[in-house]
Image (spheres, rainbow, N blue to C red):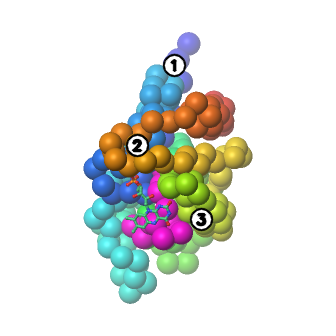
Amino acid sequence: MEAKPEKNVLFICGSLREKSLNRQMGAYVAKLLQGKAKVRWLDYADLPFMNQDIEFPAPAPVRRARDEVMAADGLWIFSPEYNHGIPGGLKNCIDWLSRPLEPGSQETALKDRLTLFSCAGGGAKARYCAADLAETLSLVQADLVETVHTQVALTRQDYTTDALVLAPAEETALQAQAWALLDRLA
Ligand SMILES: Cc1cc2nc3c(=O)[nH]c(=O)nc-3n(C[C@H](O)[C@H](O)[C@H](O)COP(=O)(O)O)c2cc1C
């Protein structure tokens, strides 16, 4: 019997910093998916700011990011909250991914794309970013995996050591999301 091709999951981190605690949350999820799906991270730091004057033809970094997203069976966004909202770089990336591939086309990189998100932030658990992501991803017709997304409360220790320690309930929530994703990918 032919083996089923391995599924590809693309991770997007809302934080560009090297020691990002959200990226560490993604690394925890990558371990959960090991052997079940192939994971890679989208590098989107080179995207220009969204500007409709340069939309068509799309700039090369935009085409590359869209190609990576469209080659993925699922997308998983890990993001902090910046000033009660989605970090600007991530919002800019989502804005590019939400636009038609060609003038007049209905097709976008995000439309119908299986998508999940998890947010780690301060005491309020990045709730504004999580709410904004839910709103924006629904608006752009991403196919949000129907689980409650995970919100992680970063502790003083996480901040001072730059090493994420997940509470058991947070691990359980991320596991539930991972199993829901694998279910949808099966
Ligand atoms: C510009 C900026 C704004 C921030 N605003 C918020 C905020 O509104 N709510 C919050 O919980 N944390 C806020 N923070 C703190 C981040 O949650 C914290 O720096 C977090 O560690 C960033 O995620 P990362 O570790 O993945 O880079 C902000 C940080 C920055 C740099």
**Could you tell me if residue 97 is visible in this image?**
no
Q: Identify the residue under disc 2.
A: 157
- The answer to whether residue 113 is visible is yes
Q: Percent from the top left, x then y, of residue 66? A: 42, 59
What residue is disc 1 on?
A: 3
Q: What residue is drawn where x is 42% and y is 52%?
A: 13
Q: State yes or no: residue 65 in magenta.
A: no
Q: Which mark is residue 128?
A: 3
The secondary element bearing badge 3 is classed as helix
Identify which residue is drawn at 64% across, 63% down. 131
The secondary structure type at the circle numbered 2 is helix
**What amino acid type is highlighted by mark number 3?**
Tyr
Q: Which residues are magenta?
A: 78-89
* Local secondary structure at mark 1: loop
Q: Quadrant of the C terminus?
A: top right
Disc on the earlier residue, 3 or 2: 3
